[in-house]
Amino acid sequence: MHAPDTWKLQPTPAIPMGPVAVLAIPAAEGNTSQAEVRITHYPNMKGMPADANIDRWLSQVAGADGKPVQKDQAKIETFEHEGVRITLLDVCGKLTAAPGMAGGVIENGRLIAAILEHDAGPHFVKITGVKDVMDSCAAQAVEFIKSSTVAKGG
């Protein structure tokens, strides 16, 4: 994966099953809120259906009615890139942190997330932030995800 130069690597929290990398995306012009990229790797989840993760992520996003967003309210696409099967999710709404994870509520948020399936087990990428910040970096976020490759030798 090739992150834009403006995205800054952050310390990773020392929590069980925590991220292998965290990056901060700077605030959009006129905004003080930055977005965050979290990359996790769970080799033991190899073969788990992508739908289970998509459903879990959607349960963390509420629509205007306060209910979890449904699949037909999100953009979901799956494709292959250099030996990696990528399922990409893009959805807006009220974001809440996953159970047991740090973070709070983002009232008017956007989530761009991906499941990167490959021989060494899946990596998961979650990019979250307020909608206007995410809107300003959405193309970069998708390009970042699409730049995924499998390292030679593992």
Image: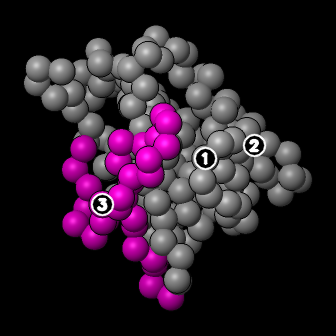
Q: Nearer the viewer, mark 1 or mark 3?
A: 1
> From the image, which quarter does the N terminus lie in?
top left
Horizontal and vertical percent for residue 126? 49, 46
Which residue occupies 50% across, 36% down?
A: 16
N-terminal label among 1 and 2:
2
> From the image, which quarter does the C terminus lie in?
top left
Q: Badge 2 is on which residue? A: 69
Which residue occupies 66% across, 50% down?
A: 97
Few, some or many residues within 10 Å of mark 1 (<14, 14–19, 20+) = few
Against 72, residue 24 (above or below) is below
The secondary structure that dominates the magenta segment is: loop
Secondary structure of the residue carrying tag 3 is: strand
Magenta run includes residue 13: yes
Q: CA distance from mark 3 to mark 2?
A: 30 Å
Horizontal and vertical percent for residue 111? 57, 51
* Residue type beneath disc 1: Met
Horizontal and vertical percent for residue 151? 16, 29
N-terminal label among 1 and 3:
3
* Residue type beneath disc 3: Leu
Q: CA distance from mark 1 to mark 2?
A: 20 Å
- In this view of the protein, which residue sits in the foreground, 86 or 42? 42
| Residues drawn in magenta | 1-30
Q: Is residue 15 visible?
A: yes
Against 98, residue 23 (above or below) is below
Horizontal and vertical percent for residue 87? 46, 30
